[in-house]
Image (cartoon, rainbow, N blue to C red):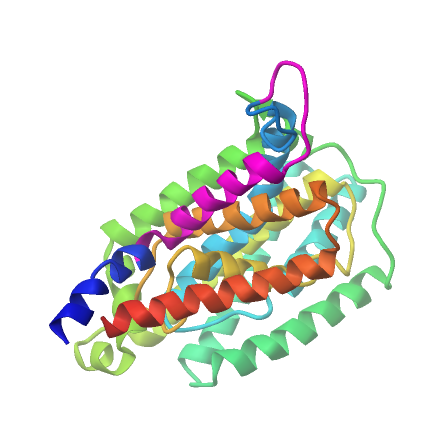
Amino acid sequence: MGLRLQNRAWLPILQRYQGLVGLVLLLIVAVFVSPKASGSGTLFGSVFFSMGNLGNVMAQLAVPGLMALGATFVILTGGIDLSAGSLLGLLNCVTAMWLSKGVSGPATIAYVLLIGTVVGAILGFLIGVTKLQPFVVTLAGMVSLRGIAYVYTHSANVSGISNALDWITHPVLGVPISGWILVLFTLVGATLLKQTVFGRRTYAVGGNAEASHYAGVPVSRVRIGAYAINGFCIGLAALLFTARVRNGQPSAGLGYELDAITAAVIGGTSLLGGFGNVWGTFIGALFIVCLNVLLILKGVDYYIGQGWKGVIILVAVYLQNLGRRS
């Protein structure tokens, strides 16, 4: 028995760094399977490791990375958010609609972030105060918010937006400003979780909500706060998404909530709550984007890629379970 536990002593370490291990393995695979390129500005003679593609990866990382950042706060409390993709779609339409009517960039940014935060707080209230299950509440939110997006736009895309958010796509040191925004807010999220009372309470609620309640932790307020932060991150992601696609789409964000959850799980966040960190989630989101780009370069069917994501989630959760048992 002792030998078995000793042999599994590495599992908690793997659980903590599984996203980084997975990313390194994926990059090694990419060296061998990526289409070849010639000329300067490439590493290993690979299209995947060209400067242009690496900039593309960072541009694509910002939106799923921010959504995964918000999802991490929710999952750490033992919750889940299935409405994230629908909220992104609605806020994308709101952003495009305001910009198409000539509203200034700062006013649009403030309005969209406010809506995202309020919607998140409402979901958190329904979960934390009324004790409804997160799955049920956010599933209802997913359907309702998507419907509102279609009604708001009359089931049509919104075009003709101003260039008020174009600065978000401009590169700085080879990385789009959207990528730097993701890094900045990941740093803020890490500080919030590790250096504040709210962060410690977030872990406590996810670890054992009942014990936290008896210890005097305001469980409901912590959950409301976590979902409000999630809504803020989705609002920010919607702004970056709109800056990149330059229109509003009521269908935008379909399936994005699953990528956000997947990134958090790959990064080592436990779906049971109470364990994980935002830097692991950042690595998890980077893993997903790199996987998507590599599959596109290889011409792999989109739905096959989705199937691989499901397998990756199962492996990540299985490793987490082994780590807890050890």
Residue 271's spot in the image, x, y percent?
A: 41, 70
Frontmost residue, 122 versus 27: 27
Residue 176's spot in the image, x, y percent?
A: 59, 30
Number of marks in picture? 0
- Residue 161 vs residue 219: left or right? right
Q: In the displayed structure, would residue 45 be above or below residue 254?
A: above
Frontmost residue, 46 versus 181: 46
Q: Which residue: 52% across, 20% down?
A: 173
Does residue 229 appear in this view? no
Q: In the displayed structure, would residue 259 be above or below residue 239?
A: below
Residue sitting at the far left: 2
Residue 297's spot in the image, x, y percent?
A: 70, 40
- Residue 260 vs residue 274: left or right? right
Does the magenta portion include 37?
yes
Name the quadrant containing residue 244: top right
- Residue 170 vs residue 20: left or right? right
Does residue 128 appear in this view? yes
Residue 174's spot in the image, x, y percent?
A: 56, 22
Q: Which residue: 34% across, 72% down?
A: 321
Identify the main secondary structure in magenta.
Answer: helix
- Residue 118 vs residue 37: left or right? left
Q: Which residue: 31% across, 75% down?
A: 219
Q: Which residues are magenta?
A: 16-42
Q: Which residue: 15% across, 76% down?
A: 1
